[in-house]
Image (spheres, grey):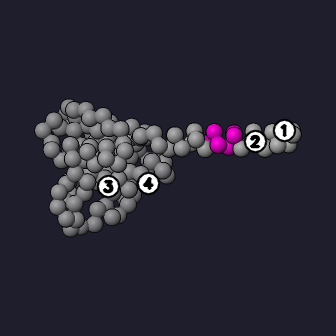
Amino acid sequence: MTASRFRSLSRFAATLLLWALASAAIAAPVSATLYRDASCGCCHKYVDHLRVAGFDVTVADMGNRAERFGAAGVPPELSSCHMMRIGGYTVVGHVPLEIVARLLREQPDIDGIALPGMPIGTPGMPGEKTQTFVVRTLQGDVYARL
């Protein structure tokens, strides 16, 4: 084998290895911790929705909701039935997965996002969507409309 051919094969092998490592990293599930009230059924449905999408979700009891939300910097007007920590962000409520994915992909300089209340038609909440969902940053700015 010539030196030129050996270098070409070495570059190809290195490229293939980098591609395999990158693919494995992309395929690894994203870990999240979801804090909820023990008696809340819609939170279980949201967790199921996340897991079906490939997220690795740990479920924990919320404890005192006001304290938990306050410690995470969530204002009362943006609260919902559960809160999740994912990728260094706080995600409050039944935020659709495409918005969670956008948050993780874009990595904006914010603390997190919230879909206040429990809107019908969001992941985990049964029924047909009847309104525009407005996802806000924890500072109150609009992050997305669906």
Q: Which residue is mark 2?
A: 9
Q: Position of residue 38 (x, y in %)?
A: 16, 35
SS of the residue under disc 1? loop
Q: Upstream in the sequence, badge 1 or badge 4?
A: 1
SS of the residue under disc 2? helix
- Of the residues tagged 3 and 1, which is closer to the observer? 1
Instruction: Please say whether residue 44 is visible from this viewpoint.
Output: yes
The residue under label 1 is which amino acid type? Answer: Met
User: Gap between marks 2 and 3, in whole Å?
Assistant: 45 Å
User: Gap between marks 4 and 2, in whole Å?
Assistant: 38 Å
The residue under label 4 is which amino acid type? Answer: Arg
Q: Position of residue 140 (x, y in %)?
A: 35, 54
Magenta residues (range): 13-18
User: Gap between marks 4 and 3, in whole Å?
Assistant: 10 Å
Residue 96: numbered disc:
3
Q: Are marks 1 and 2 in contact (CB under 8 Å)?
A: yes
Residue 1: numbered disc:
1
Neighbourhood count class around disc 1 (C-alpha, 10 Å): few under 14, some 14–19, many 20 upward = few
55 w.r.t. 122: above or below: above
